[in-house]
Amino acid sequence: MKGSDSIKKEVVLNLGKNGLTKNFIDEVKTHIYKGSRVRVKVLKSALGGTTAKELASEISGKARCGKVDVRGHVIVLER
């Protein structure tokens, strides 16, 4: 594959003070199954005593997707 062929559409979602709601998980599922890569920016108010890695595991489990990377407060998910 050439460079431009391997680039996937990327969607950025913000995880805020409401945390992991059903609507947020549904939004992640929608974008994942459309073939997009999803970046989740975790705001400090969403952490509430957990880490971004723990949230990434929880999101990938509930949305049934793969966790690609966690860097700081940014989670990258793929199908």
Image (spheres, helix red, strand yellow):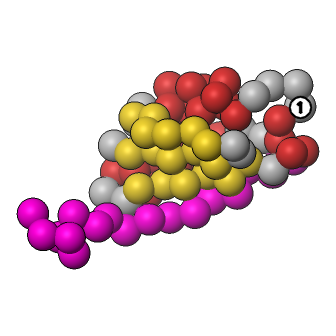
Q: Residue 20's image quarter?
A: top right
Q: Is residue 23 visible?
A: no
> Measuring 80% from the left and 25% from the top, which residue is drawn there?
50
Q: Residue at x 66, y 24 (%)?
A: 54
Q: Is residue 24 above or below residue 68?
A: below
From the viewer's side, name the closer residue of 62 and 79: 79
| Quadrant of image for the N terminus | bottom left
Q: Position of residue 9 (x, y in %)?
A: 37, 68
**55 shown above or below 78:** above
For this orientation, the residue located farthest to the left is 1
Where does the C terminus fall, quadrant-wise?
A: top left
Q: Which residue is mark 1?
A: 48
Membership of 12 in magenta stretch: yes
Q: Nearer the viewer, residue 68 or 58?
A: 68
Q: Note whether 69 is above or below 49 in the view shown.
A: below
**Image-quadrant location for residue 55:** top right
Give amino acid for label 1: Gly
Magenta stretch bounds: 1-18
- Badge 1 crowding class, 10 Å Cα cut-off, few under 14, some 14 to 19, many 20 or more, is few
Q: Is residue 45 left or right of residue 5?
A: right
In the structure shown, which secondary structural element does the residue marked by tag 1 occupy?
A: loop
Which residue is the extreme one toward the bottom?
4
Can residue 2 be seen in the rendering of this structure? yes
Q: Position of residue 60 (x, y in %)?
A: 50, 32
Name the residue: 59% across, 33% down.
56
Residue 49, position as x, y percentages in the image: 88, 25
Q: Residue at x 55, y 54 (%)?
A: 39
Is 13 in the magenta? yes
Measured as percent of width and height from the top left, residue 7 is found at 29, 67
- For the image, the number of numbered tags is 1
